[in-house]
Amino acid sequence: MFLGQSCNSRGEVAIGIINAVLEKYGTYESFEATNGGKLLSKSQIWSIIRKYMQKEGCSGEVVVQLTEDLLSQAVMMVENSRPTLAINLSGARQNWLEGMLRHEIGTHYLRGVNNAHQPWHSLEGRKQYGLKPANPTEEGLASLHSVLFRKQPFLWRAALLYYTIFQAGRMSFCALFHDLERYVQDPGVRWEYCVRAKRGQADTSGPGCFSKDQVYLDGILRILRHRQTIDFPLLAALGKVSYEDVDHLKQYGALEKARIPHFMQDTERYMQQLDHIVATNCLSDEELEQLLPA
C-alpha cells in the first residue's frame, strides 16, 4: 500500500504550502524570479562555493562538479574515494545557491564527517546503540537549511515533491504530468518532477511511484514539531543520527573533534529562523502537534 491515514494529513499540509506560494505570487515561476535571483555563471558559482567552503573550514576537502545532467538540484556522493558535490547549473540562482551549500556541505557532509568519529559509525555500531534510521531527520534538517535565512523561506520544493509522489501512486506518468500543470507551468520542470516520482517503475502507464522523495517534507515537519526541545548543535555534532536519539547518545558521543556548521552556532538566531519558516508556510504549533502527536 502507498498511503496511510497519516500521509493524507501531510498531503494536506503540502497543498497548503503550495497554495500559500501561489496566493502570494500567482505562479511558482513568479516566486522563483522574485526570490531566487538571476541564474549564475560558472565563475560566479565557483566564487560563492569557495567563500562558503572557507566559512565551514573545509576548503579543498570536497571535489565540486558543475553539471546539467542531474535530476536534483545538487547531490553529495563519494567518487574515487573522495567526497564529491555535483551541482545542477540550471538551479544555481543568486539568492539560493548558499542554501544549496548549507544543505549539501553544511548538513550532509559535515554530519558525515562528525559521524566518522562516533562509536556508531558502522552498521554494527548503529545496532549496538539501538539507533533509529538517520532519515527522515537527515533530509528534513538539510531541507530546512536550504531555506534558512531566506526572506521568504517557503518549503515549496519539499511540498511539491510530497504532492507529486502522492499523485504518482494513483496516476500514470501522463496523467501526473498534466495534473502538475496546475502548480508548475514550465513543462521541462514538470517532466523532471514526474521522472523523479516514476523512476524505477517498469510500466509508467499505471499508478506507482518511487516514494523516497516524501522524506523531505516528513522530516521537516517532525523537526519543526519538536524544534523547542532539540539540541541542534548536538544533533549536528553526533553525526548521522535521528533527533530522537540525541538525548540518549550525548553521553557516548565523541565531541572533541565535532564540526558545527557556521550557521548553527548562533542558537538564538537559528531558532528565530525556524519560527520564521513555520510562520511563512502558514503552519502553527497546534497544527504540528495534531499532525504528530507526542
Image: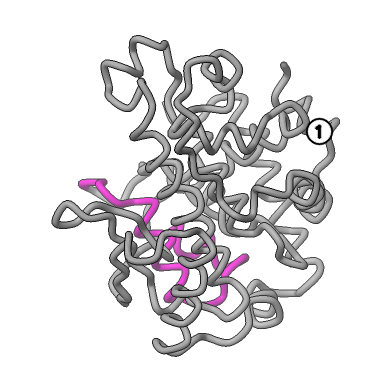
The part of the image, by quadrant, that contains residue 292 is top right
**Residue 205 pos. (x, y %):** 30, 52
**Residue 203 pos. (x, y %):** 24, 48
Q: Is residue 30 left or right of residue 7?
A: right
Residue at screen point 48% across, 16% down: 252
Q: Amino acid at mark 1?
A: Glu
Q: Is residue 21 left or right of residue 52?
A: right
* Colour convention of the picture: one colour
Q: Which quadrant is the N terminus positioned in? A: top left
**Residue 103 pos. (x, y %):** 51, 55
Residue at screen point 35% across, 18% down: 126
For the residue pair 123 and 202, the one nearer the viewer reads as 123
Q: Is residue 129 above or below residue 235?
A: above
- Looking at the magenta stretch, what is its main secondary structure? helix
Q: Is residue 166 visible?
A: no
Q: Is residue 1 magenta?
A: no
- Callout 1 crowding tier (Cα within 10 Å): few <14, some 14–19, many ≥20: few
Q: Is residue 168 visible?
A: yes
Residue at screen point 71% across, 37% down: 224
**Residue 19 pos. (x, y %):** 74, 58
Residue at screen point 39% across, 65% down: 59
Q: Is residue 266 above or below residue 96?
A: above
The residue segment tinted magenta is 175-202
Furthest residue to the left?
A: 80
Q: Is residue 208 left or right of residue 144?
A: left
Element type where label 1 sits in the image: helix
Residue at label 1? Answer: 287
For the residue pair 154 and 161, the one nearer the viewer reads as 154
